[in-house]
Image (tube, helix red, strand yellow):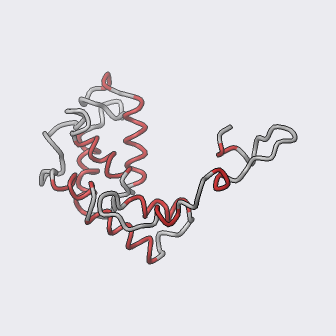
Amino acid sequence: MNCLYQDKIKPIGVTMPDWKELLRGDPLPWLLEPDTVQPAIRYFTLRDILGRDDSDSEVKKAKAAIMSSGPAPIILAAQHSEGYWNKPGPGYGPKYQGTIWSVVFLAQLGADGANPRVRSGCEYVLSHSIAKNDGFSANGTPSAFIHCLAGNLGAALIDLG
């Protein structure tokens, strides 16, 4: 049974254990370790598991680490000054390297949407990846609407503000 629904749907007479009871030990010390390779782990642990607010000093410090180490600065280093990655245009291709993918990955990594380079990438997507029918497009035409692309990109743009 999916743990997200454990408080809503329970088989009669069955008590669902707390997810922490299923572990061999407490993962929090490990998840909270500063990590220059994957700094987002600490940020998401503080925010999503421990429920700390974005105004918390440790959360702010963890968010700043995302922008200075790990994959986010590497992705941003490959960005062109106009706001795109790899080549100008709608930004779907090459797959996993184009502008759309870079924006999605930055969001999934917890990048700071207030960062000018991140904002520039988002603005580039909004000005180059929307077709005449107002849908996100892999190549700028309505026929290149891809549902998962629209979902991932929409979520990324929301996450980045």
Q: Residue at x 46, y 59 (%)?
A: 44
Camera-side residue of 3 and 158 = 3
Looking at the image, how many numbered discs can be counted on the residues? 0
Q: Is residue 15 left or right of residue 155?
A: right
Residue 63: image location, x then y, percent? 37, 66
Q: Quadrant of residue 42?
A: bottom left
Q: Residue at x 16, y 51 (%)?
A: 79
Q: Quadrant of the C terminus?
A: bottom left
Q: Is residue 108 left or right of residue 88?
A: right
Q: Residue at x 34, y 64 (%)?
A: 35
Q: Is residue 78 left or right of residue 4?
A: left
Camera-side residue of 23 and 132 = 23
Q: Is residue 152 above or below residue 62?
A: above
Q: Quadrant of residue 119?
A: bottom left
Q: Is residue 96 above or below residue 61?
A: above
Residue 148: image location, x then y, percent? 41, 32
Q: Residue furthest top?
A: 143
Q: Is residue 133 above or below residue 160?
A: above
Q: Is residue 134 left or right of residue 19?
A: left
Q: Quadrant of residue 33?
A: bottom left
Q: Quadrant of the N terminus?
A: top right
Camera-side residue of 19 and 63 = 19
Residue 67: image location, x then y, percent? 28, 63
Residue 107: image location, x then y, percent? 36, 52
Q: Residue furthest bottom?
A: 57
Q: Residue furthest right?
A: 13
Q: Is residue 60 above or below residue 82?
A: below
